[in-house]
Image (tube, rainbow, N blue to C red):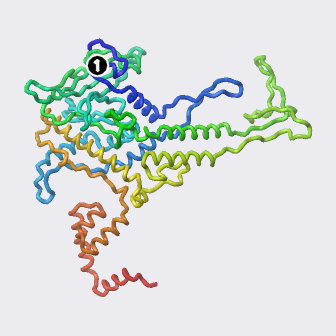
Amino acid sequence: MAGEKLKTINDHPKVNIDPNELRRIDRNLKQYEGNYPHVEYVNTEGHVKQRDYMTLNLRKLSADVLAGLVFNEQCEIQVSNGSEEKEDNTLKEAHEFIQHVFEHNKFKKNLSDYLEPMLAIGGLTARPYFNDDNKEIEFSWALADAFFPLRSNSNGIPEGVMKDTTVKVDKDKTYYYTLLEFHEWEKDEFGDDTYVITNELYKSDNSSEIGKRIPLSDLYEDLEETTYIKNLTRPQFNYLKPAGFNNVNPHSPLGLGITDNASSTLKKINDTHDQFWWEIEMGQRTVLVSDKLLRTVPDERGNKPKQVFDPNTNVFKAVRMEMDQEFVKDVTHDIRTDQYIAAINHSLRTLEMELKLSVGTFSFDGRSMKTATEIVSENDMTYRTRNKHVYEVEQFIKGLIVSTLELAKFHNVYQGEVPSFEHIGVDFDDGVFQDRNALLTFYGKAKAFNFIPTEEAIQRIFKVPKKTAQEWMELIVQEQVDIDPQELGQWRQDRTFGIEE
């Protein structure tokens, strides 16, 4: 393919993606960026004018709200196949290595940041790679517009291509370099699966085209064209998509953005908000002025003289009035604020239903947002929707851990055992969804009926380690021992009947 030109990714012989999927992803990305066409209108003089389309960008806002509920940096990731008490964990080396890699790459922060565009656009890909300069495993991220499947099955996407674009300016001319990184499986002479990574570089002076293939050395001096990796159990890239089935294209392995099935509602909200903004813009004071109050000002350029009422008044209209009429009349109409807010909030309720979020998640007037405690206490839709996305993120993290350790073994920077998914624990911080008062009541009753040890109740309510719970128990017992029996009896009476004033 040396020298061959590609206009789109689908022009490559290895790639065959439904063009509708590419257009959908491109539309999602533009709307997520807030990139909408200008609004054209005809002014009072008959001239065609343009103005910005004023939107609420709920594609970004909804993804931001859900991303914050799904994952945060308090998430704990453990690799272990033993118990804490017996200390027979043979995956301790794997755990320590992964913690180092994640810390080096700021993985939790990056994943937290990338979840928002993933939910908005419909997909996210991450793959580990070996940095030969610092001998570290690092991560490469790609959004939905930069990853394309080559082959898929019911278990996921085993083969795909990642796209990375670099912009360079040479002698006042801009060039776009596109690196296509193909991940495929091949059979060797013994019939074993070999993982093959192939790199292709393209150059174009048009940002909308991939361009002509050029040697890798033109931009990447040390990048190999083909790399073979053996003894892998899974692809090196890990694809994450929002929970749910792609009903827009049932045969596509790609994910949908969370608002893809609510496009008409988003348009209705944006159109209403745009009209509201334009009504405010055009709602400035309008005055009818008698022509008897106007004075004629000559034009310095020799044009037709202008009629002026007041240089500080930017909107007025001159009309002929009789002597017994008012010479100045205000004809400004009130802005329909309440009607527009009601219309937008009605559409927001529809959006909440389509996204399976609780009523009050979005509010244009800012008066009906729900707290996390209300969400969990009502057992509402947001909590259940969040849990579906949590499962997808959990599988993504586990796959990335396995891929990272297998790549590290290939480059001899890790010599330990590679865990299976069941030996990887991802503990999402659910504190935002847990009502401590409800937990205290539940475990308090369980303790009263001797259904749970006190140490265990302390651990579950306050989210502290077992050792801390034991220390608390010792302090509690010590405090009870130090209380005088008579004072202890009075204390119990006060707790039961209250303190008399």
- In the rendered structure, the answer to whether residue 447 lies left or right of residue 246 reads left
Give the residue furthest to the bottom: 486
- In the rendered structure, the answer to whether residue 233 lies left or right of residue 54 reads left
Q: Nearer the viewer, residue 55 or 191?
A: 191
Say how many tags the image has: 1
Q: Position of residue 74 (x, y in %)?
A: 31, 51
Q: Which residue is mark 1?
A: 13
Q: Position of residue 194 (x, y in %)?
A: 15, 28
Residue drawn at point x = 37 percent, y = 80 percent: 495
Examine the image and state in which quarter residue 174 appears.
top left
Q: Nearer the viewer, residue 33 or 73?
A: 33
Above or below, 395 against 249 in this view is below
Residue drawn at point x = 35 percent, y = 40 percent: 245
Residue drawn at point x = 35 percent, y = 84 percent: 493
Q: Position of residue 124 (x, y in %)?
A: 33, 36
Above or below, 385 against 154 in this view is below
